[in-house]
Image (cartoon, rainbow, N blue to C red):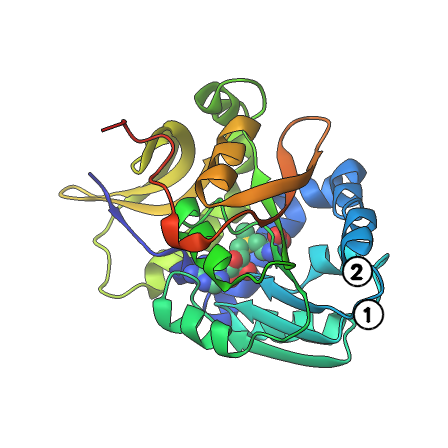
Amino acid sequence: MPTELPASALYSHPSLGRLWKKVHLSCSPFLHRSELQRLYCLPSARIRKHFGRQSYSLIALGCADGTKESLLLKKLPRPTSLLALDTNLSLARRAARRLPAFQKSAHRADLTSSLSLQFLSTRLSPHPTLITLFGVLPNLNPLPLLRSIRRLMKKDDLLLFSANLAPGQSSHTGALSILPQYDNRPTRKWLEAAILRYRPKLPQGHLEFGVFPDPKQKTLARIEARWISPRKIHTVFSSRRPTSSQVEAWIRSTHMRKLARYLDPLGEEGLWLVQPSSHPASFSRDPNSPKR
Ligand SMILES: C[S@@+](CC[C@H](N)C(=O)[O-])C[C@H]1O[C@@H](n2cnc3c(N)ncnc32)[C@H](O)[C@@H]1O
């Protein structure tokens, strides 16, 4: 089994944040397809209906520079407060500058760390809260992250998250068809820079891209960049590519309820608006793990 680098190792240094942004500008379908940009404007009507005239707060998790949140907020009232959180503090600060809110703050956070999540729980506002999570579920283990977010949510809070989908019915075949979005020069340059910075130092090697089953959920395909060296293989980058029905199984298993779903016409990306459905104390196990 390859050793995995934490996703934060690819983003947390300012220079890596800049290289990631270059990859995003040149390779991300989001920048090149207007349907994908429109997708992030669509949920505002349903969110307005949910909050009515109440004030609300916004927590933008893994927000980078807040590009997608700014599309969403175009048709929403200005939030009372904004908390922009990312492993890359300079990107989170850019998001806080860009996004409208009456009070703003930006923080470095590691969404896989219970300490960061505890910090977040101390910063929650009494207002109903909209939590956004765009482009993060592909990189982090989805069920623990969704469970942690669910635990933070009050009854009337909303979570709007995106998932990068595998087009078609099969997670594996769909992921193979979009591999060229990852196996390209700008992405290699970004990942090689992250490998050079990583400690303990990785041995000499080379990058190979492929599609593999997610170690935690075998039916879920992950696009991976692996660093191959003579004695060891490291998974440097991974992007999970679920089907829509796999995403909806995650929602149910983390005790949330789908309010709306917005799908890219090509089936490569989707947004889900969800709210808590029941008490979080009794979370079920991974929906795709074998039944006992
Ligand atoms: C693929 S980018 C998506 C950025 C942006 N939300 C978007 O959709 O364009 C993943 C983001 O998650 C952040 N990130 C990765 N691992 C993280 C972690 N463990 N904790 C907090 N943020 C993390 C990265 O810094 C980066 O901004």
Residue at (80% x, 40% y) in the render = 34
Question: Amino acid under label 1?
Answer: Arg
Looking at the image, which residue sits at the far front? 279
Circle 2 residue: 73
- Are circles 1 and 2 on residues that touch, CB within 8 Å? yes
236 and 145: which is toward the camera: 145
Residue 256 vertical placement versus 58 (above, below): above
Q: Is residue 277 left or right of residue 82?
A: left
8 and 280: which is toward the camera: 280
Q: Can the viewer see residue 11 in this picture?
A: no
Residue 270 vertical placement versus 31 (above, below): above
Q: How far apart are labels 1 and 2 at the CA level?
A: 7 Å
Circle 1 residue: 78
Q: Residues within 10 Å of mark 1 (few under 14, many from 20)?
A: some
Q: Is residue 131 left or right of residue 47?
A: left
Residue 147 vertical placement versus 85 (above, below): above
Check disc 2 and report its element: helix, strand or loop.
Answer: helix
- Snapshot quadrant of residue 63: bottom right
149 and 42: which is toward the camera: 149
Check disc 1 and report its element: helix, strand or loop.
Answer: loop
29 and 213: which is toward the camera: 213
Looking at the image, which residue sits at the far left? 231
Quadrant of the image for the C terminus? top left
Residue at (79% x, 47% y) in the render = 46
N-term-proximal mark, 1 vs 2: 2
Question: Amino acid under label 2?
Answer: Leu
- Percent from the top left, x then y, of residue 235? 31, 45
Q: Can the viewer see residue 253 in this picture?
A: yes
